[in-house]
Image (cartoon, rainbow, N blue to C red):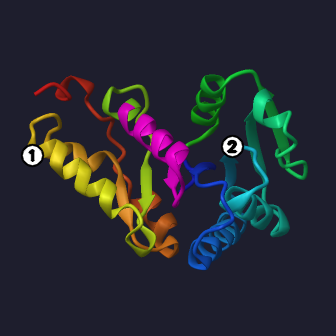
Amino acid sequence: MSDIQSLCVYCGSSINVDDDFKDAAHNMGVILAKAGIRLVYGGGKAGLMGIIADSVMDNGGEVIGIIPTHISDREIQHTGLTKLHIVDTMHERKQMMMDYSDAFLVLPGGIGTLEETCEVMTWRQLGIHDKPIIIANLKDYWTPFFSLIDFIIDQGFMRTDDKKIAMVTDTIDDVLEKLKAAPKESFDPSSKWI
């Protein structure tokens, strides 16, 4: 796992969610801090975002937050991080999160998390990066998304092999093991077109 020094975590900013999701975010923060893996995330202090950041910091880990000005101006950025980058746009934020990360983990979240998940998967499919992606399907949260992917494959817009773009787990307990087992080869973007 020496090649995974920083993990980008996409997750929701709502606190009005299942306690199991809150617990998972907290526990993932502990796991990252103990493993010496830096958290890279969207820089917010609300919801699962704030929980995982606090957990990493409380356990002696490092956290890099990246937040756009229009959100930072509303004073919902996290001020207790190792480093907080305030950028101009969402596009700049997402690019910086990509650049600062060695791998990606998706926890439950809203439409923003869904959008980030689709983008990081698309970028891998297109060969823009070859970093591991793990989707934590906690309590079957992402099962409807996987059903949509299956439907898209059935309709001929994706290949069956494209499901390998992201690894899936139903618990955060094996995220680090999955990162260790992640394929090292690059995804061949020429294979995208059917």
Q: Residue furthest front?
A: 16
Q: On screen, 69 above or below 8?
A: above
Quarter holding the C terminus is top left
- Residue 169 % position (x, y): 39, 67
Which residue matches tag 1?
154
Secondary element type, mark 1: helix
Start and end of the magenta stretch? 103-122
Q: On screen, 157 above or below 27?
A: above
Q: On screen, 62 above or below 162?
A: below
In percent of the image, x 32 and y 40: which residue is there?
185
In percent of the image, x 84 and y 49: which residue is there?
78
**For residue 135, side relative to residue 143 (left or right):** right
Which residue matches tag 2?
42
**For residue 70, side relative to residue 11 (left or right):** right
**For residue 135, side relative to residue 30 (left or right):** left
Q: Nearer the viewer, residue 142 or 160?
A: 142
- The three-letter code of the residue at mark 1 reads Asp
- Main secondary structure found in the magenta portion: helix
The crowd level at tag 2 (other Cα within 10 Å; few <14, some 14-19, many 20+) is many
- The three-letter code of the residue at mark 2 reads Gly
- Residue 14 % position (x, y): 66, 59
Question: Is residue 8 part of the magenta span, yes or no?
Answer: no
Contact, mark 2 vs mark 1 (Cβ under 8 Å): no
Of the two numbered discs 2 and 1 on the same chain, state the one appearing first in sequence. Answer: 2
Q: On screen, 87 above or below 118?
A: above
Q: Which of 4 and 83 is in front in this view?
A: 83
